[in-house]
Image (cartoon, grey):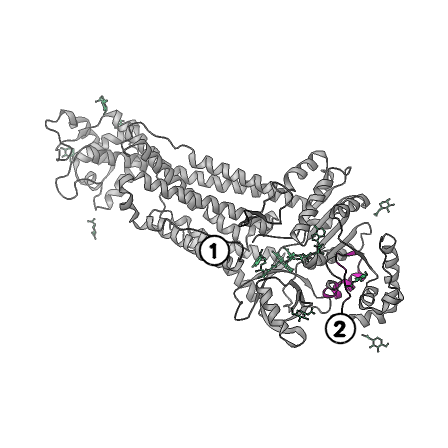
Amino acid sequence: MKQLNFHLFFLLLVGCLSVIKADSAYKKYGPTLKALTSCQRQLSNTAVFCTTGKTRGNKCICTNPNALATAAGCLSYGHRNTTAIFKALFASCEAYNVTLTVDDMVEAYQNYTKYAIHASDIPNFNAKSPVHVPIRLNDTNIRLYMEAYDKYLGNYDNSLYYSVGVIGYWALVFLVAIIVNWSQVLFPGFFKILTGPISNKFRKHITMPAAFGKKKTTEHKVLKIFHFLMPSRFETIVIIGFLAVVIAVCSAQISYVEGDPVFDSKSSALLRYTADRTGIVATIIMPLLILFAGRNNFLQWLTKWNFATFITYHKWVARVDFTLVVVHAICFSASYGDYYTEVMKRKYMKWGYCCNCSRRNNYEVFLTIHIIFAALWIAGTWIHVQDLGYVWFVYPSAALWVLDRAVRIFRLICFGFPEAQITLLFNETLKVVVPKPKYWNSVPGGHAFIHFIRPTCFWQSHPFTFTNSVQEGDQIVLYCKVKGGITHGLNKYIASHPGRTARVRVGVEGPYGEPTNAKIYDTAVFIAGGNGIPGLYSEAVDMALRSKENNKQVIKLIWIIRENKSLLWFYEELLALSQTKIQCTVYVTKPKGDINNVEYNEVIKLSSRISQSENDSTEEVDKKEKSKYVHEKTEVEFEPSDSEANSNIGAIKSEFSHIEFREGRPTIEDIVDSEVKESNGSIAFVTCGHPMMVDEVRYSVIEQVDKSDGKRIEYFEQLQVWA
Ligand SMILES: Cc1cc2nc3c(=O)[nH]c(=O)nc-3n(C[C@H](O)[C@H](O)[C@H](O)COP(=O)(O)OP(=O)(O)OC[C@H]3O[C@@H](n4cnc5c(N)ncnc54)[C@H](O)[C@@H]3O)c2cc1C
Ligand SMILES: NC(=O)c1ccc[n+]([C@@H]2O[C@H](COP(=O)([O-])OP(=O)(O)OC[C@H]3O[C@@H](n4cnc5c(N)ncnc54)[C@H](OP(=O)(O)O)[C@@H]3O)[C@@H](O)[C@H]2O)c1
Ligand SMILES: *[C@@H]1O[C@H](CO)[C@@H](O)[C@H](O)[C@H]1NC(C)=O
Ligand SMILES: *[C@@H]1O[C@H](CO)[C@@H](O)[C@H](O)[C@H]1NC(C)=O
Ligand SMILES: *[C@@H]1O[C@H](CO)[C@@H](O)[C@H](O)[C@H]1NC(C)=O
Ligand SMILES: *[C@@H]1O[C@H](CO)[C@@H](O)[C@H](O)[C@H]1NC(C)=O
Ligand SMILES: *[C@@H]1O[C@H](CO)[C@@H](O)[C@H](O)[C@H]1NC(C)=O
Ligand SMILES: *[C@@H]1O[C@H](CO)[C@@H](O)[C@H](O)[C@H]1NC(C)=O
Ligand SMILES: *[C@@H]1O[C@H](CO)[C@@H](O)[C@H](O)[C@H]1NC(C)=O
Ligand SMILES: *[C@@H]1O[C@H](CO)[C@@H](O)[C@H](O)[C@H]1NC(C)=O
């Protein structure tokens, strides 16, 4: 619900901003303006009527009776002489302080019928020297002008409708997603019934897998320099649909009128139409581009798609938008032929070019460059279309961006900037304990973006999953794996402090994300790898609390870690599991070497609970009971023997009698296989951890989807990779 509040806030702001600047410079041509423009242009191309002032141009029609009569004749063709068109003409004449009435038009038409003569009947007719009679226009020519302007100006109008079509495509996609994803939440029973061969086939082949191959969260490398992430098959279908719609929209109704008087040649006409179409489509889909990239995108809440999915779409909308702008620029320049350089000098062409480059290797550098270019892109578009009447469509883009930033700052301020205690554990994980305000509700499985307020990195914000502190209320805890960027810097900083602990002021922007829908399944298996544990842990615990009465629901937590010592940084949380019905299994893939005394003591120091739980004798009995149940199914049983009891790991593991320990790297396929076989009713797998492991889990679950008879098997991914 907290999420909903933020989203509503965001929507409200969007609404306000779009109303503020509603004085549109955009003009829709429509049949009247198209007809009027075609007659105005035909007149000035046919003859000169005015002797003084600017001889060509629309002013002459307002002031010269012969020109007005000719115009009235032109407009009467095909009964276009409606009140609407007269009004448009009168309005244009008002600009020259000339007031005309309908009576004038009736009289002008009579003058046309009475006095007009064909240009060819005028001796020594010269299109450059003024005539003193109305000119009778050739019907074929009127039609030609009419059709040509229908194409040329009509294209502006059509382009708008077609662009709305592109937006409509996305709206449709989102609508389907909203219906499907919310009905799973609102009518869980219905979906379990729906499980059949068809739905299984659909999920197995469309919604669950990566487009090609096994890797989805693991990046693909091409020629060692190009990195990319494979979208899911469903995302691919959405993207292909989008590309198809854009291609259709950019080529529909673009054709040439033979003998077109507006353009010199067929190619320049077609190029211009294409340029206008692509330019307008590019401008109007721009808000999507910005919206998808925002952290506070209300569509995330509506569709229940995560940020990473929207970033995938963002990338494709960006690619398409960029391509459209390039096509626009090229076609526009080409349609002008020799005038190219002349036109290039015009303000809006100068701004028409912007480029975008990206690198994955250094995310922060990429992000900074990306933001600068995005700002230039929006500003460039703004200035480029300002005089063209399309600036109205740039406001939403700018507004969305400003708003996303505003909500982000709002969230940061809501949280305050507390001092966090950061502890470096075993050179591999930073434990960040942040006191949180009471009104800030943490979301199970949610994450927040953290700013560490230090001179070298305060502007960076990194996403980390949080758990509620098990030791003290009103604290959240993040466990950050030490990598190469900000975490590396912090690692060095903290390591230089006595006790490997320091207090650092932090900004917390969140909560984002939400728990998966695993809670409606009869069995939920959470598979975490390494530092992927916090989110899954908090989700599992939350689920266990909710299903206290539901004895049938089985919750399992599987954690795969590399070394015994990794246990220690999640020590408190693992201990707390004994109070829940969660069945926890820990795999240690490289159980070499004992935890040394320094490390052990470090954890003991941090832990206040060890002695407490030892004192609690009833709890102890409880744990033994549980451990018996767990151990019945254990292959490698762990009971601390006398010799091991002295060792640290032995001491620690004896604390965890409610947890089953196994050694060696598990085969994900076997885990999934056996869990499916063992489960009663529906089963959901939730995973987060190393991308390779996550891909393995997805693949294994997909393998199982249609094998089990009538069991609903679902897969949820809490790992998000977008950089
Ligand atoms: C929703 C979510 C929750 C996460 N939760 C946790 C967690 O609980 N514990 C944990 O250890 N890690 C978590 N991560 C991963 C964590 O965000 C990255 O490991 C961290 O940002 C790396 O920082 P760095 O500068 O040290 O990384 P670098 O060594 O510079 O980069 C390592 C990789 O991290 C990714 N990355 C870097 N900066 C960002 C950024 N600002 N936003 C997104 N990705 C980035 C890039 O893919 C990059 O290749 C989570 C990521 C996401 C998306
Ligand atoms: N929401 C999110 O997006 C989110 C949340 C939290 C964390 N994260 C990120 O998730 C990652 C967590 O991974 P980590 O780096 O901490 O993990 P890790 O240390 O690389 O791996 C953890 C364990 O998983 C095992 N493993 C890896 N692939 C496996 C496979 N295919 N089958 C079986 N076991 C496998 C490893 O075994 P071996 O030793 O044999 O390799 C290791 O024991 C981090 O990068 C973290 O930043 C993301
Ligand atoms: C019609 O023609 C007459 C004579 O040329 C002219 O005086 C009159 O102004 C014209 N009417 C209009 C409305 O142009
Ligand atoms: C409109 O044009 C028709 C001929 O197409 C003509 O009969 C009619 O009088 C015109 N009406 C006006 C108001 O000019
Ligand atoms: C129209 O009249 C107004 C005031 O009467 C004057 O300010 C303006 O310059 C005039 N416009 C033209 C185009 O003559
Ligand atoms: C009208 O013009 C076209 C070409 O400009 C010509 O072929 C046609 O004969 C003309 N028609 C009349 C009625 O003058
Ligand atoms: C962490 O690494 C540093 C230097 O790499 C080393 O001196 C220290 O002993 C390590 N500490 C632990 C607990 O592994
Ligand atoms: C890890 O624990 C296992 C027992 O579960 C033990 O055999 C192994 O020696 C331990 N390794 C370390 C590093 O303590
Ligand atoms: C455990 O019990 C002992 C004696 O009953 C007591 O002195 C000690 O403070 C207790 N420890 C905790 C953490 O409650
Ligand atoms: C599944 O249900 C059967 C019968 O209701 C029961 O015997 C079995 O223990 C259950 N299995 C699990 C894993 O709960």
Whether residue 109 can be seen here: yes
Q: What are the residue bounds of the magenta stretch?
A: 567-594
Mark-to-mark CA distance, 2 and 1 = 46 Å
Residue 589 forms part of the magenta stretch: yes
Question: What residue is shown with label 1?
Answer: 370
Whether label 2 lies within 8 Å of ligand 7 gets the answer: no
Tally the numbered discs.
2
Q: Is residue 220 left or right of residue 592?
A: left
Q: Nearer the viewer, residue 354 or 442?
A: 354
- Expressed as whole percent of the image width and height from the top left, the position of residue 93 reads 23, 43
Judging depth in this view, the residue of 398 and 504 nearest the camera is 504
Residue 49, given in percent of the width and then of the height, sits at 15, 36
> What residue is shown at x 33% (from left), y 35% (from top)?
152
Name the amino acid type tagged 1.
His
Mark 2, residue position: 601
Q: Amino acid at mark 2?
A: Asn
Q: Position of residue 226 (x, y in %)?
A: 53, 49
Between 449 and 20, the one nearer to me in the picture: 449
Work out which quarter of the rendered image holds the C terminus and state it: bottom right
Look at 22% across and 43% down and name the residue there: 99
Which corner quadrant holds the N terminus? bottom right
- Asked which quadrant contains residue 235, the reply is top right
Between discs 2 and 1, the one toward the N terminus: 1
Front: mark 2 or 1? 2
Residue at coordinates 17% horizontally, 43% vertically from top-left? 54
Q: Tell whether 325 sits left or right of 473.
A: left
